[in-house]
């Protein structure tokens, strides 16, 4: 028997997940919601390998972006804020730049240090995720490594934040 | 509560200023809305035109980013490079030099939502300035994936 309060919380979380999923829309090209997030390793801008699988047990916000993408840049301050606010609770933001060249990304990061890792994306990685054929594109991955949200284009960040909060592990008192 | 909300707003505002300072070039991008509506072509209309045989086909040029083109592009479209930077425009001029001025040309990008595309208006302006009279711009409302690939229109992969 589930206590009423917990049922309410679980029901709310489910509603948030469903609302966010329908808002994100569906793409024949992308990995299916509730499927495993394709694993990958790519170097960050300093050459250090970053392995998505190392973040298993965290909620991962996987953000495909580029320096030429104005709506991507508009989202970044919010992602930085979320990393700082929810990082200790188990959120990990991971940026994947789809710039054709690393130079503008390095310039950007020199001026604007981000609170989360950024790796250079490439064509095989894009195809691994069904084709990154427009930006911004963000996936939300749960603690078990399952994709629970896909957000294409300029989207409602408030809905994503609600989904993140619903996915984060509850702190023990 | 109000104090916390104010602090969050201030932090986000400060971060936005930093990001804006890091990307001055984007602020100067000419909007796609500057392209006359009469010179737009809808994805469904171009797809139908490409499937007609033996109707003459337009020259199709991709004026966006290579990583996106390599993942999916319109068959027989040539990769030119981003219209929003000098190298891309130079490539466009070089390619245009081999095309008769009265040829039908379609340019497309699809990297971002239409109103945020950094490439398409600059490429259109360049071709018009070069004297091309039959330039059409593929109207991609959201992105190439949603507005072309997901609609089932013809696609090729690779560079």
Image (tube, rainbow, N blue to C red):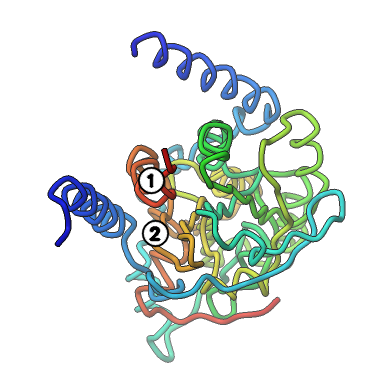
Mark 1 — residue? Answer: A160
Answer with left or right where residue A113 lies relative to residue A91: right
Mark yes or no: residue A75 visible: no
Question: Most extreme residue toward the right, as rendered?
Answer: A47
Instruction: Identify the residue at horizontal 52%, vertical 18% (top origin).
Output: B13
Q: Are marks 2 and 1 in contact (CB under 8 Å)?
A: yes
Mark 2 — residue? Answer: A149
Whole-angstrom CA distance, mark 2 to mark 1, is 8 Å
Q: Position of residue A41 (x, y in %)?
A: 73, 67
Instruction: Identify the residue at horizontal 40%, vertical 71% (top origin).
Output: B46
Q: Residues within 10 Å of mark 1 (few under 14, many from 20)?
A: many
Q: Position of residue A72 (x, y in %)?
A: 54, 42
Using the image, name the chain to which the residue with label 2 belongs.
A
Q: Position of residue A139 (x, y in %)?
A: 48, 58
Among numbered discs 2 and 1, the one appearing first in the sequence: 2
In this rendering, is residue A45 above or below B153? above
- Does dot 1 land on a helix, a strand or a loop? helix
Instruction: Identify the residue at horizontal 31%, vertical 61% (top origin).
Output: A25
Question: Most extreme residue toward the bottom, as rendered?
Answer: B54
Q: Position of residue B21 (x, y in %)?
A: 68, 22
* Quadrant for the N terminus of chain B in the image: top left
- Does dot 2 land on a helix, a strand or a loop? strand
Q: Quadrant of residue B80?
A: bottom right
């Amino acid at each position: 028997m589930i206590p009423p309060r917990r049922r309410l919380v679980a029901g709310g979380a489910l509603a948030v997940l469903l609302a966010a999923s329908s808002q994100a829309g569906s793409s024949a090209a992308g990995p299916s919601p509730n499927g495993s997030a394709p694993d990958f390793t790519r170097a960050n801008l300093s050459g250090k390998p970053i392995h998505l699988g190392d973040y298993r047990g965290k909620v991962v916000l996987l953000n495909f972006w580029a320096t030429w993408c104005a709506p991507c840049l508009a989202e970044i301050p919010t992602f930085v804020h979320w990393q700082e606010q929810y990082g200790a609770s188990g959120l990990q933001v991971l940026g994947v730049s789809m710039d054709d060249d690393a130079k503008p990304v390095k310039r950007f990061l020199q001026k604007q240090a981000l609170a989360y890792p950024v790796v250079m994306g490439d064509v095989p990685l894009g195809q691994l995720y069904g084709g990154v054929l427009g930006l911004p594109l963000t996936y939300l991955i749960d603690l078990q490594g399952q994709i629970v949200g896909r957000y294409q284009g300029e989207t409602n960040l408030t809905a994503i934040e609600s989904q993140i909060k619903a996915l984060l592990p509850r702190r023990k008192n | 509560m109000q104090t916390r909300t104010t602090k969050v707003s201030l932090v986000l505002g400060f971060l936005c200023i930093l990001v804006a300072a890091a990307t001055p070039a984007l602020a100067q991008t000419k909007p796609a809305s500057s392209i006359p509506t009469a010179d737009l072509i809808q994805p469904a209309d171009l797809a139908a035109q490409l499937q007609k045989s033996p109707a003459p086909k337009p020259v199709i040029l991709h004026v966006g980013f290579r990583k996106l083109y390599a993942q999916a592009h319109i068959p027989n479209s040539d990769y030119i490079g981003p219209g929003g930077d000098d190298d891309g425009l130079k490539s466009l001029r070089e390619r245009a030099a081999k095309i008769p001025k009265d040829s039908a040309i379609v340019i497309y990008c699809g990297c971002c939502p239409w109103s945020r595309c950094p490439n398409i208006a600059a490429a259109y302006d360049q071709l018009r300035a070069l004297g091309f009279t039959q330039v059409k711009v593929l109207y991609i409302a959201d992105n190439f994936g949603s507005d072309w690939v997901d609609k089932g229109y013809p696609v090729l992969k690779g560079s």
